[in-house]
Image (spheres, coloured by chain):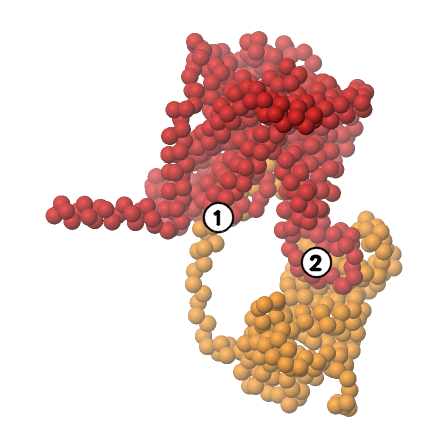
Amino acid sequence: MEGEQRRPLVRFDGEDLGHGEHIVLPHLSLALYAGERVALLGQSGAGKSTLLGELRARLGRQVAWCPQHHGLVPQLAVYHNVFMGRLPEHSALTNLWNLVRPLRRSWREVTALCDELALAGLMRRPVGELSGGQRQRVAIARALYQARPLFLGDEPVASVDPHQALRLLELIDARHVTSVIALHQRELALTHFDRVWGLRDGRLVIDARADQLTLAELDALYPDADRSDPSPPPDDSAETLPNVDALPCARGRP
Amino acid sequence: MSDGLTKRHGELAPSWWHGGSPGLRLARHTLGLVALAVLLVPFADLAIHTRDPWGELGRMLAGLAWPAWGALTSPLSALGLTVAVALWGTLAGVVLGFPLALMFTRSRLVRAGCAFVRAIHELFWALLFLQVFGLSALTALAALAIPYAGIFAKVYAEILEQTPRAPRDALPPGSGRLARFAYAELPLAWAQLTAYTRYRFECGLRASVLLGFVGLPTLGFHLETAFREGRYHEAGALLWLFYLLIASLPWWGHKRLIPLLLLGGAWLLGPWPSVDGGLLWRFVSEDIWPAALLAGDWAGFVAWLARIPALGPAIGNTLLLGLLGTVGALAVALVLWPLASRHVGNRGTRLAGHGVLIFLRSTPELMLAFVFLLLLGPSLLPAWLALALHNGALIAFLVARHADAITPGMPGLPASGRLAYELLPRVYPGLLALLYYRAEVILRETAILGMLGIATLGFYIEEGFDYLMFDVAFFLLLVTAALNIAVDALSRHFRPREAPIDDPCVR
């Protein structure tokens, strides 16, 4: 079934990826095939976000995008944040009107989606008032609402418990043919994905089918994990610098 | 032995002078500023021209203590007009400034234009428009709206630029510029934009009062008349009215009441003057330019320049007063901030400290300078006192707020030790940065204080308008604007980098 003759969606052939002059992933070679579910593993700073960003840029409108730290607008309601997934499909005026009064069809669609993600009843709540796990699900809802064949997620299940993480991944799988998801849960990577890409210090050290890998091999991606964490140095720089919030204007500030 | 001592001493001094730690750098910085001010003080006219300043002060304080409420004629209409001008002026500033803010980062022309209109004080704009629109609401509104448009453009642009990029980057491709702005930029900046607009409205309220000094019938007009004629009990009542207006702003300035206030204000602002287009055009195209320049007669233009009275001394006085005011504000802020901080004194002293700060920072500089002028006579001294006290109190208030957010690491230190070791090292960079932000404001105020008879640029600008020498007045306005822009650039350059202040409301 894994036919070698299939055309890849994207292929990197010894390419240097990075931001402008600064190269994060030198000489990268890999390919992404349609229908594959890929887990992207690696320490923070290994280059996961750079790789996902590049995939997003190359795949363009096929991609449902769920960025790191969500990229939500805390002041807007859950409904509007999810709606943002389909901004390009409406005219500018419709989009503006939707801020004043939700479009009836979109409201129905988003309600259905939020019900599935256990966000029912929160549609009118500003995202800033939600818990970390709820925000995570709003970010996923926005990506699902885009209704694209390919899901790219930068740690979309980082701040939820393992049980919920599994449920969310199943939801993502049910709605997308292909997915590349950065995560830290190694067990999930083995049980729930077809393929694992492992990044370490800007190099792709693992590119293999998940059923041919062991946990021990994945542990090699995290060299510092078993070493006891030295306690971080006390951070007093934050105190010596004047806090901007401590200098509010005379009056009228909320 | 003594040789060794002097040698060691000789090494100590340079290490103190050349040390690179932030504390030493700021100390040198401050000492340099103070030394410059001390060097230049002999050039300033600080004489006291009145005979009995203390007696006069006593009579004024008595007026403030026993205000004559009954003597006020139509205080409500003056109050209403003050609020209406501030409200509509600010609104017009927002309407003009917001589109400019969207172009601000892309267009050099917009940036330069905004810097220019910002650099001229509201009262100077009022003097200019007075010539065309007369004593009307149009003059008042334009005087507020035009400089505020420049300020809003700059500050709004900065706020919008500082909104987090993540939500914008998360949007699907092809979302459209307008939708991106409405969904992923405006909501993030909204709270800050409205907070700043509110703050600017407060400034507008003070400016609206001051417009009375050029003859518009706002609160300031009645205040000036009462003070000038020595009716201090009536002036006291008017001052109390002003403080009540500022203090009760959170209640009457509630956002649900704003539309009502706007409607009521519009009714108060009338009647509108009929604008003669031809006259306006003549003013803009001919009256404010030197005739020689319009004729292309360069020799005549040079002769015209040479005839401008006391240009050099006026610029010198303006800059000197700006410097003295800045250093004075530093001294006042250093003395006053501990009074309002929770780390020093008891509840009684704190309450008194807060009271003094609120009193000093809500009274406009021009108002303070006017009162000191009556006390001390026309020299730089009253202006210096007013600038130092008002701006020092403003900075002290912000620094005290900053200090209150600090938890001392060593509890149980005596107050002096806590001040010197725990608090001052932490708040001083912020204090100095605030001072540099204020330096530009102080210079702008300095020019305006000339209208009271102090020999800064404002004095000659008002004289120019009084004698219908519009070309001279306009030229001096341009000089003032150039000075402001130059000092703004200079203070930006020298401002300590240790304390970035992102909150636009402190400017």
Colour chain B appears in? red
Report the residue marked by disc 1.
B497
Chain to which mark 1 belongs: B
What amino acid does circle 2 point to?
A: Arg
Q: Residue A190 carries which label?
A: none
Colour chain A appears in? orange
User: Which one is in front in this view, the residue at disc 1 or the one at disc 2?
Assistant: 1
What amino acid does circle 1 point to?
A: Arg
Q: Which residue is drawn at 64% across and 40% down?
A: B112
Chain to which mark 2 belongs: B
- Tell me: residue B140, above or below residue B344: above
Distance (Cα) linking label 1 and label 2:
29 Å
The percent coordinates of residue B183 (x first, y second) are: 75, 54
Q: Which residue is drawn at 66% across and 81% down?
A: A13
Q: Callout 2: few (<14), some (14-19), or many (20+) C-alpha neighbours within 10 Å?
A: some
The percent coordinates of residue A201 (x first, y second) are: 54, 76
Chain-order first, disc 1 or disc 2: 2
- Tell me: residue B323, above or below residue B496: above
The percent coordinates of residue A138 (x first, y second) are: 72, 63
Q: Do marks 1 and 2 both belong to one polypeptide chain?
A: yes
Q: Give the side of residue B221 with respect to residue A94, left or right.
A: left
Q: Give the side of residue B16 with respect to residue B459, left or right.
A: left
Res. B336 image quadrant: top left
Q: Is residue B151 visible?
A: no
Q: What element carries label 2?
A: helix
Q: In which quarter of the image is the N terminus of chain A?
A: bottom right
Q: Is residue B130 visible?
A: yes
Q: Quadrant of the C terminus of chain A?
A: top right
Report the residue marked by disc 2.
B168
The percent coordinates of residue A251 (x first, y second) are: 60, 36
